[in-house]
Amino acid sequence: MILYNVTVMVESDVASDWVEWMRMHHIPEVMNSGYFVSHRLCRLLHPESEQNSVTYAVQYFCTSQDKLSEYIAKVAPPLRDQHNLRYGHKAQAFRTVLEIISDDPVMARDSLG
């Protein structure tokens, strides 16, 4: 299993709007692409960043690196453009890719369906 993690530092004045937009629009569009089997939206509890921002991690679970590469090449660019058009410099993202080597079976069952 591959974890595609998008960490986003969001300015506090747009954080509520960003979370709502992610939950109602962006994440459903990503999930409807068919490349991911599950997702999570997390908020960093003790950010060491600027006080006027909130940091979130959006985690998407994919069955293979090939599928993720295809998503990044074919689907991600217009979705990133929508995000950038809506929030610009107020929401700065960086992405990481992790291979899940071991998972708690109870957590995996709960999060993946």
Image (tube, rainbow, N blue to C red):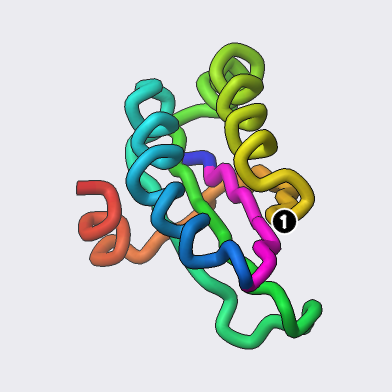
Q: Quadrant for residue 44, please give it.
A: bottom right
Front-lying residue, 113 or 75: 75
Q: Position of residue 24 (x, y in %)?
A: 33, 45
Q: Is residue 101 magenta?
A: no
Identify the residue shown where x is 38% and y is 39%.
25
Q: Describe residue 15's horizontal placement relative to residue 8 as left or right.
A: left
Tell me the SS state at disc 1: helix
Q: Is residue 45 above or below residue 66?
A: below
What range of the chain is rendered magenta?
A: 3-12
Identify the residue shown where x is 28% and y is 61%.
105
Instruction: Give, as a three-letter code, the residue at label 1.
Output: Lys
Q: Is residue 76 above or below residue 10?
A: above
Disc 1 target residue: 90
Question: How many marks on residues?
Answer: 1
Q: Quadrant for residue 48, please give it.
A: bottom right
Magenta stretch: dominant secondary structure: strand
Q: Describe residue 7's horizontal placement relative to residue 26 as left or right.
A: right
